[in-house]
Image (cartoon, rainbow, N blue to C red):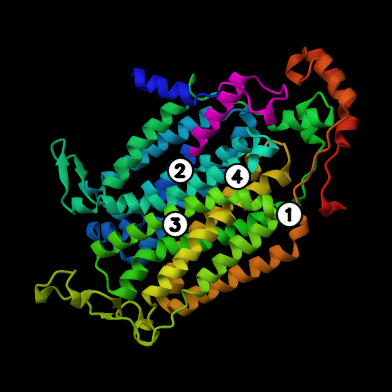
Amino acid sequence: MEFARRVSARFETKRLPEDVDDGLETLEEYKQRWRSVRIIYFTMFLMALGFSIILTGIWPFLNKLDPEAGKEFMGLIVAANPLGQMIFSPIFGWWGNRLGKIRLPLLISLALFTLASGIYSSLELRPDNVKYWMLSSRFLIGVSSANIALCRSYLSAATRISERTHAVSMVSLAQVLGFIIGPTLQAAVTPLGEQGHVWLWGMMHFNMYTASGWINVVMSIGNFMMFLPGVFEEHKIAAREVMVMQGGTSETETWKGIKPNYYSAWTLIIAFFVLVFNFVLLETLGTSLTMDMFAWSDDEALWYMGIMMTTAAIVSLVTFVLIEPMCKLFAERYVLIWGGFSLMFLGRVLFVPWGPDPPKLAQPFNASLNLSESDPMYLGCPIAEQKWCAELPALTLTQFIIGFAFTSVGYPIGVTLIQTIFSKVLGPRPQGVWMGWMTGSGCLSRVLGPIFVGSIYTRLGTYWTFGVTSIMMLVSMFWLHCSNRLLIPPTFEKAPAELQELNQSNGGTLDDHSPEESVRNDRHHSASTKNGSYHSLAHA
């Protein structure tokens, strides 16, 4: 304990950094603010993990529980999570704006996440209509994950303009690592096998499929405790910073007087949809694609995809660290277009098969032969379900690895800078509802991605699947390039020093005044604040 105390004291912030030592907050408030931001990082990681941790194992698990369910129902199960998140994200965003606090919605959502994860892990008890129980559990996890809108909104409110790119990079890193580490954890528990361990008089099954849900349960309980009073304290500074820069005295009137560029905002929301759609498509399709193209068994697919996801996590980590330095050399919008979207486009093009021969064909399962489903005879592309298997060339392993590598670099850049520019374009206003729409667009892509797999990949094959997604990425990249001047975030001019000193002598922020004085100040400064310095080249 003494050693831990000394280590903690060594890394404790002793004084405010020079670039933020401007009187807007005390050292204690600064430390509490960044502690709350780091808790948001972990929450984003957990919500992403809750979606991705079951992706590589969901098909063999569903096939074990109900062999008649089929891949199309698997697509519905995967889509249920983002559907719940898409529906409830704007609602959670509105709720957070209404309360002015995020603690209560987050505590309720994390309790629901814990319950839904426990239901998923209990499916080995084989209730009636087990596939619908699986569908319901994934939908409830999606509803609880709608708290991401609140997390993004709080992050925008709790960081200064100069801190925003770094903070969004870190929260995006947490989210992408959640997406990538999920399948890695699934691979790590694969040695448990299908039987695993049975505890609590047969009521708790811990095997290669249910372990992922129990991991979610444990981590969500820890996350719940982080949001209890005394641990998580909300500190919002964005509106106060802009208010002081403009020489105002009312945070509310400051952000109300600043109108965002709605065209820019919706352009970024649509771009976010396209980017996430392509990433989730690969994550959803990855396991079944490798089993079809390379004739891998269930265990081999889980193991090799886990290795690739782990490698991708390391590449993504390096990429996130490099985003901030790159944005100091080049404008954020150019790094987004040519660093994020261009690499994602190349990754999709590389997935268009160029192998000389069709993939190995899997024969329909015949129970009378007394062979297991993992017998080489039954591995490969299932010609009975996917007629194109015998007609189209196979994807090569080299193609898959290179395309996966491009995606591992392009997606982190794109998802980070879209959110960074989006939060800056909106200005210091409460962003709960807007972040709900942003989150909802990403969720819509996760709904359509699995459905796309079921309807396009299963019926038409790899040419259509990756041809359509390549065109999507190319069109989006061209649109962003044509609209790049509208992606320039607004700048806020500092008020003259004399005016700032006058404001400080009058009490500083709205919270320092009595209600009567606040009303008078709001009325006095309303006109000047509404015409405040909110400049963007898009409006020049």
Q: Is 25 within the magenta?
A: yes
Residue plotted at (70% across, 38% down):
161
- Magenta highlight: main SS: helix
Q: Earlier in the sequence, mark 4 or mark 3?
A: 3
Residue range in magenta is 14-41
Point out which mark residue 43 bears: none
Point out which mark residue 45 bears: 2
Q: CA distance from mark 1 to mark 3?
A: 31 Å
Could you say where residue 258 lies in the image, as x and y percent from the top left?
A: 80, 39
Give above or below for 516 relative to 179: above
Are the residues tagged 4 and 3 within 8 Å (C-beta)? no
Most foreground residue, 21 or 217: 21
Hey, what amino acid is under mark 1? Answer: Leu
Query: Mark 3 — residue?
Result: 79
Are the residues tagged 2 and 1 within 8 Å (C-beta)? no
Q: Earlier in the sequence, mark 1 or mark 3?
A: 3
Residue 506 in view (yes/no):
no
Could you say where residue 117 lies in the image, as x and y percent from the top left?
A: 34, 42
Direction from residue 131 to residue 162 in the image, left or right? right
Give above or below for 373 relative to 335: below
Could you say where residue 537 lies in the image, as x and y percent from the top left?
A: 83, 52
Q: Earlier in the sequence, mark 4 or mark 2?
A: 2
Q: Looking at the figure, which quarter contains the N terminus?
A: top left
Q: Earlier in the sequence, mark 1 or mark 4?
A: 4
Q: Is 422 within the magenta?
A: no
Residue plotted at (68% across, 34% down):
160
Q: Residues within 10 Å of mark 3 (few under 14, many from 20)?
A: many
Residue plotted at (71% across, 65% down):
481
Residue plotted at (42% across, 50% down):
51
Circle 4 SS class? helix
The nearer-to-camera label among 1 and 3 is 1
